[in-house]
Image (cartoon, rainbow, N blue to C red):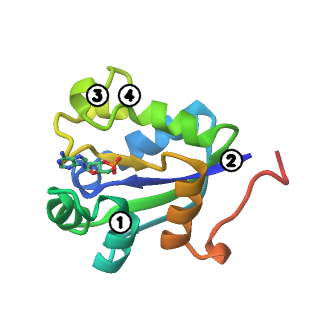
Amino acid sequence: MEQTYIMIKPDGVQRGLIGEIISRIEKRGLKISAMKLNVMSEESAKEHYKEHAEKPFFGTLIDYVISGPSVSMVVEGKDAITIMRAVNGATNPVNALPGTIRGDFAIETGRNVVHASDSPDSAKREISIHFKDSEITSYSKID
Ligand code: CMP
């Protein structure tokens, strides 16, 4: 059983896509084992995206991600990391296939609706930034 960190970014929340996105995750067969809606702190946002700290778009990215409420989730299931990358589609929506979240709802990399961890190490790191252990439940014992 694998866990990944998923964020519905402020543009996704503002556009009323929370239910649509959660529905796609659940219908695919993955489970939400933690969830919160809040305005991410600047500190958390900078830690989350620290690998991009030297990129020219870093400042814009941080401003965007803390510009309004986002939804943070831990999503759990077999191959959850790979499956959620596929559910979200390519980072640049120009390359995202129809049927993916970005392929259906986004046109710009800077407003790409969702984030998903890209590896087991990233998932562990990102989950620990946004959730305490005590906030995460698990279905693995009842499945
Ligand atoms: P995400 O999957 O959250 O991971 C890194 C984020 O950086 C990415 O989605 C985009 O939101 C953002 N990003 C990547 N490249 C660019 C870019 N060229 N311009 C603006 N934002 C970008």
| Residue 77 drawn at (x, y percent) | 68, 43
Q: Is residue 137 left or right of residue 98?
A: right
Labelled pair 2, 1 in contact (Cβ < 8 Å)? no
Mark 2 to mark 3 CA distance (whole Å): 26 Å
Mark 4 to mark 2 CA distance (whole Å): 21 Å
Residue 81 circle label: none
SS for callout 1: helix
Residue type at numbered disc 2: Glu
SS for callout 2: strand
Residue 2 circle label: 2
* Residue holding disc 3: 104
Q: Residue at 31% x, 38% y: name it.
A: 91
| Label whose residue precedes the other's in the sequence (1 or 3) | 1
Residue 50 circle label: 1
Labelled pair 4, 3 in contact (Cβ < 8 Å)? yes
Disc 2 under 8 Å from ligand 1? The reply is no
The residue at the far top in this view is 98
| Label whose residue precedes the other's in the sequence (4 or 1) | 1
Decide: is 36 above or below 98. below
Q: Residue at 32% x, 45% y: name it.
A: 17
Residue type at numbered disc 1: Lys
